[in-house]
Image (cartoon, coloured by chain):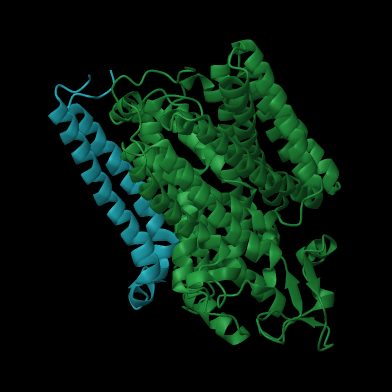
Chain colours: A cyan, B green
Amino acid sequence: MAFHSKELAKAYWRENIKLLLSLLFIWALVSFGFGILFADALNNFHFFGFKLGFWFAQQGAIYTFVVLIFVYVYKMNRLDEKYDVQED
Amino acid sequence: MMDIRTWTFLIVGLSFVLYIGIAIYCRAGSTKEFYVAGGGVHPIVNGMATAADWMSAASFISMAGLISFMGYDGAVYLMGWTGGYVLLALCLAPYLRKFGKFTVPDFIGDRYYSQTARTVAVICAIFVSFTYVAGQMRGVGVVFSRFLEVDITTGVFLGMAIVFFYAVLGGMKGITYTQVAQYCVLMMAYLVPAIFISIMITGHVIPQFGFGATLADGSGVHLLDKLDGLSAELGFAAYTSGTKSTIDVLFITAALMVGTAGLPHVIVRFFTVPKVKDARKSAGWALIFIAVLYTTAPAVAGFARLNMINTINGADSQGTEYSEAPTWVTNWEKTGLIGWEDKNEDGRMFYSGDERNEMHIDRDIMVLANPEIADLPAWVIALVAAGGVAAALSTSAGLLLVISTSISHDLLKRNLMPNISDKMELRYARSAAAVAVCIAGYLGINPPGFVAQVVAFAFGLAASSFFPAIILGIFYKRMNKYGAITGMVSGLLFTATYIVYFKFINPAASVPENWWFGVSPEGIGTLGMIVNFAVAAVVCHLTPPPPQDVQDMVESIRYPQGAGEAQVH
């Protein structure tokens, strides 16, 4: 057993899920939200010459995706160390 | 001064020498090297190889062209084909790496303790991969026939020979390092013309900025406003708003995202890195390398549209005399991908979205013709040809590997003849790859008319079968084989029926009024996925829980420690 106790294993998994859901929320917000559902409303604002909704759909969502993955990598590595389940 | 053809021979030829050299240097000696490159690939290298593997002839050749004609709606491809990597990195890659086997059917078969589940997964994997590979070989053929002026058959044979050489010899190890080289070639080929054209049209070096900037002609009008204006004038929908309904855009994007995360040739890449930590990081690097092309593509699309309309309709929007047509029009006319019909008999070409239109322009030519439209030097055009070939070859190689692994490992070793030795298995893997290359080549020379339609199939099937089964396998310990199998089968049947009906049986009925909830066949995979999840959840609660050792296995893949290298058993 890699975890020191069952409770720790549960706590680790709970924190993992929490991180996952919050990152996936942002993922859905920028793509389905800003890029599609609210695109028309956001198109009233301008951003570096783009209509904002259009920019999210064709540019901004993709940049956000990249950032999300690296935030996840960083936070998960910290979490692994906190619970002492990182690889050797 | 060398002409386009000489340059193309030179640049494409040199790139081939490079790929073959790498393949000889990185020969695979064991099944482990053949399947997962020995599991020792650095995450950045793996990210780059994954990016090359992912960006197919469709991404390279067709996507910007599609966006150019679809405007805002093109976002379904941009977000759909990148957003899936977030799902991969967060929900699949690290856990599947910890699980530590070679293939997706391996995971499905072990997690659901069932040969039936494994077989369903193998069949899906092979079907999805063949669908894809047919399109790739066609892409090679198109590039060769236009730029080397050989016929498509010869082009496809050449492509087959190269892929055969390095996929069959090198396995995953050879493929991974060749793909790194191919990534560099295809990115150069995409960026160089994009930067040239961005400078010409807007004065910005970076296309992503030029896309939103004002035109360099001194008018002070933004590129996108200019395109919206032209669209209104010519009877098209506004470039920045598109024509699809919001719900359809939503469902197609979701289906492509989830489908991406469920594609076996993408997932298998995360088995090739040494650690769980690297699997997470590797997905991030892959997405960075992919994002470079995917954020450039919409800019290229915008530039190309403006350039094309201006050269065909002329600066005064009265139409250009056909006798003075630029050479790219006449060159592509020979391939049948551009056509002009002088309806009002004034001897001028005119392109529009209403009854004044006299042009037929195939969407697939936009990227390849773009440098010619912008009058760039011959070596840039040759570079684009090499890039298109690199994109097609790297993706075909990855897919061929999935097909051969599915047959030699999942079907023979794990199913039909469990006692064969490593050496025999390797021999079977190589023969399977060889047969697959031949079938792919045949499909490239005699393309079934439905290649474009089956792409919807590949993503729909991956979204409605693999993705829910893997997610539930990791995040829901109580999920048992009954739930997983009924879920996969019902998701698959639902999606397949919908697509087959609207794409093959009754294509005339495929209009928004007839679609369920207004969702097109391209987006139905999302509903199929929901069906899969729902059926699996209900069935699993009516049947006994999975055995204790399976539950323990699920526990153990949830944290990184003790991952070790990918194991045969």
Left or right for A42, reference B507: left
Counting from the top left corner in percent of width and height, residue B20 is at 69, 26
Q: Nearer the viewer, residue B316 or A87?
A: A87
- At 77% from the left and 67% from the top, the residue drawn is B338
Counting from the top left corner in percent of width and height, residue B460 is at 54, 53
Left or right for B146, reference B484: right
- At 25% from the left and 32% from the top, the residue drawn is A77
- At 42% from the left and 69% from the top, the residue drawn is A54
Instruction: Determine the image quadrant of residue B401.
Output: top right
Could one spot residue A50 in this view of the protein?
A: yes
Position above or below: B511 against A82: below
Counting from the top left corner in percent of width and height, residue A81 is at 19, 27
Could one spot residue B287 in this view of the protein?
A: no
Left or right for B142, reference B406: right
Position above or below: B222 against B179: below
Instruction: Determine the image quadrant of residue B227.
Output: bottom right
Counting from the top left corner in percent of width and height, residue B405 is at 60, 27
Instruction: Determine the image quadrant of residue B557.
Output: top left
